[in-house]
Amino acid sequence: MEDIKELFELVPEDEIRGRISRFQERMVARGVDFSLILQNVDIFYFTGTLQKGYLCIPADREPLFLVQRDWRRAQQESPLNIEKMGSIKELLSFITSMGLSEKQRVGLELDVLPVTLFLRLQGFLGERDFVDVSADVLRCRARKSPFEIEQIKKSGKIVEHVLSTVREHCREGMAEVELDALLQAEGRKAGHQGWLRMRGLNQEMSNICLLAGKSAAFPSFGDTPLRGYGATHAIAQGASHRKIGRNEPIIIDYGGGYNGYTTDETRTFVIGRLDEEFERAYEVACRILQFCEDHAREGVNGRELYQQSVDIVSKYGLEEYFMGYGDGKVKFIGHGLGLEINEIPVIADGRDEILEEGMVFAFEPKFVFPDQGAVAVEVDYIVRKDGVERTAGFPTDIVYL
Amino acid sequence: MEDIKELFELVPEDEIRGRISRFQERMVARGVDFSLILQNVDIFYFTGTLQKGYLCIPADREPLFLVQRDWRRAQQESPLNIEKMGSIKELLSFITSMGLSEKQRVGLELDVLPVTLFLRLQGFLGERDFVDVSADVLRCRARKSPFEIEQIKKSGKIVEHVLSTVREHCREGMAEVELDALLQAEGRKAGHQGWLRMRGLNQEMSNICLLAGKSAAFPSFGDTPLRGYGATHAIAQGASHRKIGRNEPIIIDYGGGYNGYTTDETRTFVIGRLDEEFERAYEVACRILQFCEDHAREGVNGRELYQQSVDIVSKYGLEEYFMGYGDGKVKFIGHGLGLEINEIPVIADGRDEILEEGMVFAFEPKFVFPDQGAVAVEVDYIVRKDGVERTAGFPTDIVYL
């Protein structure tokens, strides 16, 4: 079997150890004796491998990764102790071998763990005090290390590249899905990992959401201001078969994906010219972006960033269109980024969220005009002590093609 | 707001009514008073729309779809009664308005419902007898209607198209991800909906799994014989950055997606020629396919199809390599297809599964040779009274480029 270290940039061992010990501190604070981690992204975060199994993290000793498949690969990718496990029926005997059989308080990711699997686990482990540690996992994941920020910047490079090829590919009269196809191919060729992840049931995430003209104003279920028709109502988001026209805003919301890490940026393009109403709203979006760049830093409360953005919008009389229209309005303007696209911090109405150094978030002032279309910009930022730093460098002006 | 019926081929009303009444028969048989359906694919199946909410299906009266977002779109797409619901706190009052408040036995999709959400539902509905109806939903979905088979055949056309363009795009020395990018773009331009769905936690599905030479023999977690390195160990499946070489099998496993419906076919390509060992194994794979075409029909047990396939493999002394190698072996040779890629019937070792007319399944004899590569073929079939019918027509021979 080939040496995987030659092929991939693996997560460094000290990085993994640091993540585990930060999580253990949280477990101790909550009186959790041991946790069983089973969601693939959380497993990747704590082990450095995406292989399938149960990661047992005791509060006070070394973790053990019980791998169902494939343990050979897991051993190459993760610095942790690994055992091969057949069925989850063997779980209790491993837990006993770790000296944990008498421990009562067990942490699980109850936000994603399905009931059927929970009941099976309960059957194998017996009646214990099961508690939800998903918020603790997500808090650990919120602050990114220098290694993680390096991956995020590489992810941002893919976004830069894809956005820079729009001029070459976009033509009047082509279907949204056609441009979507060409841009996704550009991203993949430039090293895109394949897809992005969004935590939770029913959370489906496309690498790209490309919406021209009134497509951007059509309602759908997503918790985002711009949704689109989709290629079918069975997808109900993103590009459709409608043709891209002249003099209408073309919104391209694209997410990079590199070594597990997601980025998420949006720009507005147009073939020809835009109506003054659109241009004026776009200017306000850029003012909000500038406000964020001037004010966001460690210690700032996300609640205030949201409120002050709304104040800017109000000054220009555009509240009605901000972050959606009517029932389609959403109550946030930013969200954390990392291994998943819906991480901490969420920058939202009435939500206290103190920015910490190393957090990474997408900030996305968007305006939707019913039956007409939208203008939108979205930039990813790394929180630093004294400000924010962009993860990538594509200009934020409207691009006239 | 635009009329969505002009854009999409919606699910016909009689189709929706039939699905609901078949599910109600199962509920009655199990003594379930009403079910609350919330997984997006199941909602799409029973309502005709993917919009977000809770579908309440009583055993003995009309269903009501409580839509959180977007009810305007849901109203256009679904023939069912729809109410706008804000928070799930309103659930009990809607259930009361339907005359169901005294009903005790409530069906839920416990195979996918996360514990946290289950506990919230329990909080709002009070202590009742919650039962898992996911198997009933999946049984309803297993037999496809003529409308569904039409969508599946259109999905198969996308596969045919994509496979037919391999000759044009594949070049010696290009990275797997580059060919992956070009083929995915071909699919998207030809109407691919965007992505495929696989039911369950951690189930990630790529539209394409493209593996050249020894990439196809590298182990990973997936419950499938061929996995691949992936572009990163954070994805750990599918195409990698390795170069496609001459005289090695190039496996392309591609899934069409049309109007919600998934197909899943595999072919083996090669630039140059293949070693005799590979060619001989591929011949055996084709014999197994032929056996399936000659014997599968309504009433046949999947357990026997699996066992007889293994018997053919044994006759040629290839057991060691069949459906994976060593720890990477899987115990199935076929799986159902529909709105998700892991449906009923599963054609597997020791699993009784009587084929019924209208079931659709992928049948995939594959051989993996450690450190060398794989040969593989996979064809999708519709079960008929007197045999099986292919969903698409791309030839099954090795394609020499």
Image: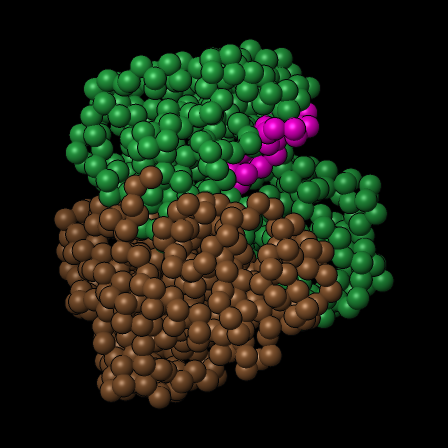
Chain colours: A brown, B green
Between A71 and B75, which is closer to the camera in this rendering?
A: A71
Between A281 and B282, which is closer to the camera in this rendering?
A: B282
Q: Residue at x 46, y 19 (%)?
A: B318
Q: Main secondary structure of the magenta part?
A: loop
Magenta-highlighted residues? B337-358
Residue A182 vertical placement versus B158 (above, below): below
Residue B272 vertical placement versus A329 (above, below): above
- B115 with respect to A166 (left or right): right
Q: Residue at x 78, y 45 (%)?
A: B27
Between A328 and A118, which is closer to the camera in this rendering?
A: A118
**Can residue B36 be seen here?**
no
**Can residue A356 be seen here?**
yes
- A201 with respect to B122 (left or right): left
Residue B222 vertical placement versus A145 (above, below): above
- B332 with respect to A165 (left or right): right
Residue B30: image quadrant is top right
Residue A309 vertical placement versus A370 (above, below): below
- B68 with respect to A20 (left or right): right
Residue B38, horizontal then vertical, whole percent: 62, 55
Q: Residue at x 44, y 25 (%)?
A: B321
Q: Is residue A288 magenta?
A: no
Residue A225, horizontal then vertical, whole percent: 40, 66
Residue B239, horizontal then vertical, whole percent: 31, 40
